[in-house]
Image (spheres, helix red, strand yellow):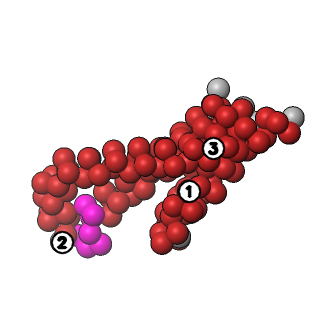
């Protein structure tokens, strides 16, 4: 059911949207979701599933990169302060990451379903 080539492509594109087009993130996610759904060639449900998985993977990787950046803080002297700050804000950050995960999965899933529907009609 999951087409890993489409998911990995969408995952990479999601990371690019988050890194370079933060201001236009919503539109970028719509486009990436459509591309993943179209690449999946699995109908509306398959396109939605693949796009949601790609969005979830992208969110998880960006959250991990953010945590590493916040923990290390750019200097060796900041490691202790970064670890303490990360420990204190860990529960709150977990809620934020879960909300981002749901947001990306829904936004990309909707257009992924549209892309999957269009690709299945073409075949």
Give whichever of discs 3 and 2 has the lower sequence position: 2
The percent coordinates of residue 92 (x first, y second) are 20, 51
Task: Give the crowd class for mark 2: few <14, some 14-19, many >=20 residues within 10 Å.
Answer: few
Quadrant holding the N terminus: top right
- The stretch of residues the image draws in magenta is 70-76
- Residue ranking furthest to the right: 123
Whether residue 8 is visible: no
Residue located beneath label 1 in the image? 29
Q: Name the residue under label 3.
A: 112
Crowd rating for badge 1 (residues with CA inside 10 Å; few <14, some 14–19, many 20+): many
The residue furthest top is: 1
Q: Residue 77 carries which label?
A: 2
Q: How many labels does the image show?
A: 3
Estimate the x, y position of residue 20 in percent, counting from the top left. Answer: 53, 71
Is 80 positioned to the left or the right of 14 in the image?
left
Q: Which residue is drawn at 69% across and 50% down?
A: 35
Mark 2 or mark 1: whose residue is earlier in sequence: 1
| Residue 92 visible to the viewer | yes
Name which of mark 3 and mark 1 comes first in the sequence: 1
Q: In this view, does 22 lie to the left or right of 16?
A: left
Look at the picture and state if 102 lies above or below 66.
Answer: above
Q: Distance between the residues labelled 2 and 1?
A: 37 Å
Task: Identify the mark at residue 88; answer none if there is no mark.
Answer: none
Could you tell me how far apart the alpha carbons at marks 3 and 2 are, in whole angstroms?
A: 45 Å
SS at mark 3 in the image = helix
Q: Is mark 1 on a helix, strand or loop?
A: helix
- Magenta segment includes 71: yes
**Separation of residues labelled 3 and 1 (CA atoms):** 10 Å
Q: In which quarter of the image is residue 123?
A: top right
> Seen in the image, is 61 located left or right of residue 40?
left
* Residue at the image position 33 percent from the left and 45 percent from the top: 98
Comparing 83 with 95, the one in front is 95
């Amino acid at each position: 059911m999951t087409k890993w080539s489409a998911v990995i492509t969408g995952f990479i594109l999601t990371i690019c949207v988050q890194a370079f087009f933060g201001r236009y993130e919503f539109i970028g996610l719509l486009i990436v979701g459509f591309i993943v759904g179209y690449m999946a060639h699995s109908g509306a449900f398959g396109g939605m599933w693949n796009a949601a998985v790609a969005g979830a993977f992208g969110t998880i990787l960006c959250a991990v990169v953010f945590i590493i950046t916040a923990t290390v803080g750019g200097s060796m002297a900041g490691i202790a302060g970064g670890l303490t700050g990360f420990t204190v804000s860990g529960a709150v950050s977990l809620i934020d990451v879960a909300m981002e995960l749901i947001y990306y999965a829904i936004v990309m899933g909707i257009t992924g379903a549209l892309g999957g529907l269009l690709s299945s009609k073409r075949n």
